[in-house]
Amino acid sequence: MDERTDLRHHGDIDAEPGLLDFAVNVRGDGPPEWLAERLRAGIAALGRYPSVADEDAARDQVAARHSRRREEVLLLSGGAEGFAMLPRLGSTSAALLHPSFTEPEWALREAGVPVVRVVQGEPYRLDPAAVPESADLVVLGNPTNPTSVQHPAADVLALRRPGRILVVDEAFADAVPGEPESLAGMSLPDVLVLRSLTKTFALAGLRCGYVLGPSELLARLQVGRAHWPLGSLQVEAIRACCEPAAVEWAQREARLIEAERAEMVEMLAAAGVSVSGPARGPFLLLRVPDGELVRKKLREKGIAVRRGDTFPGLGPDHVRVAVRAAEPARRLVAALTEVLA
């Protein structure tokens, strides 16, 4: 694989049908029943084009969820669409903090934007001073995929500079109880916050997300965007997932993830597997000897894990595993124990 291809390698490539999936960070095979019922009710209206009124209602719900104004909300066809829009900000020098989700770098490089990688070594903590002062666009994740590190909000805000736009990927923020380090509720003139609803709500196939930020920056992101960029079911899903009952549901899931993660860390540590920590996301970064062979042998045992060497700053001995319930987690650890023996 070449570097450009590596940037587009995601967990769905590792998770082939029939394998026990630890490669994709999505909770379950589909949305919870209350959300599925809401979406089924919307099928009858698919003969109509998505309406401005429905989109505004969804934007109002997102705004209320984060104590923002409608003008500060842009609905997205998945968080990845927001990364595809970043070149429209007109950056002349973009800094990407790594190891992290690679789609933003791919989008910027494809558009010819000069990119500087700021690679953080173990334990993968953010060092604002490591970012070049010349960078007029800085992109990072929080919590960060794949390291599961959650950076303090104060450290993230320390990246702000005159003439610089800060983009924070909070795709997994709703998987952290209380979302303590989120910037989603802060109205700042130079900060964009991207949110995905595909992970916690298991909507990866529907593509749902949004970006929060000043209206001037949101307008720049939309230049040249197609008409009706989201279908009506996407709009309805975004609205539903941001209603108070849904937010409460997601927080219950976040507490469950926290408990499952702690149990997985304990099991992995007992098996002698190195786990990067402290982890706060719904996934764990592991380090195993001869990682490529380990992944191959796990696949032979019917288990898919996410390769780590396509993330800048990580190597072939890194693998990422999604946080799962106790029974599948025990299967993973038992298989790892056999493979590493």
Image (tube, helix red, strand yellow):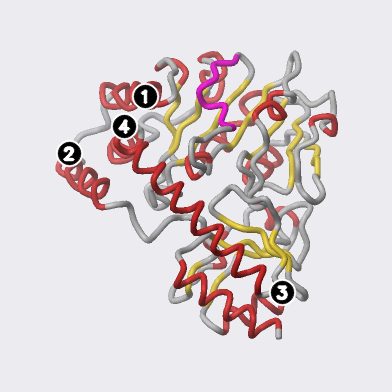
Label 2 vs 1, first from the N-terminus: 2
Q: Quadrant of the N terminus?
A: bottom right
Task: Left or right? Give the position of 47 relative to 124.
Answer: left
> Circle 1 is placed at which residue position?
59
| Residue positioned 29% across, 23% down in the render | 57
Label 3 vs label 2, nearer the camera: 3
Tag on residue 282?
Answer: none
Tag on residue 45?
Answer: 2
Contact check, label 2 and label 1, Cβ < 8 Å? no
Label 3 vs 4, first from the N-terminus: 4
Q: How much space separates mark 3 and mark 2, taking CA atoms?
A: 48 Å
| Residue positioned 73% across, 38% down in the render | 96
| Residue positioned 51% across, 56% down in the render | 25
Which residue type carries mark 4? Answer: Glu
Q: How much space separates mark 4 and mark 2, taking CA atoms?
A: 21 Å
Label 4 vs 2, first from the N-terminus: 2
Which of the pair 42/285 is nearer the observer? 285
Majority secondary structure of magenta residues: loop
* Number of residues whose C-alpha sits closer than 10 Å to that of mark 2, classed few (under 14), some (14–19) or many (20 or more): few
Label 3 vs label 4, nearer the camera: 4
Q: How much space separates mark 3 and mark 4, taking CA atoms?
A: 43 Å
Q: How much space separates mark 2 and mark 1, taking CA atoms?
A: 20 Å
| Residue positioned 54% across, 60% down in the render | 322
On the image, the x and y values in percent for residue 145 come to: 62, 49
> Circle 4 is placed at which residue position?
243
> Circle 3 is placed at which residue position?
292
For label 1, the SS is: helix
Residue 38, image quadrant: top left
For label 4, the SS is: loop
Task: Left or right? Give the position of 261 relative to 75.
Answer: right
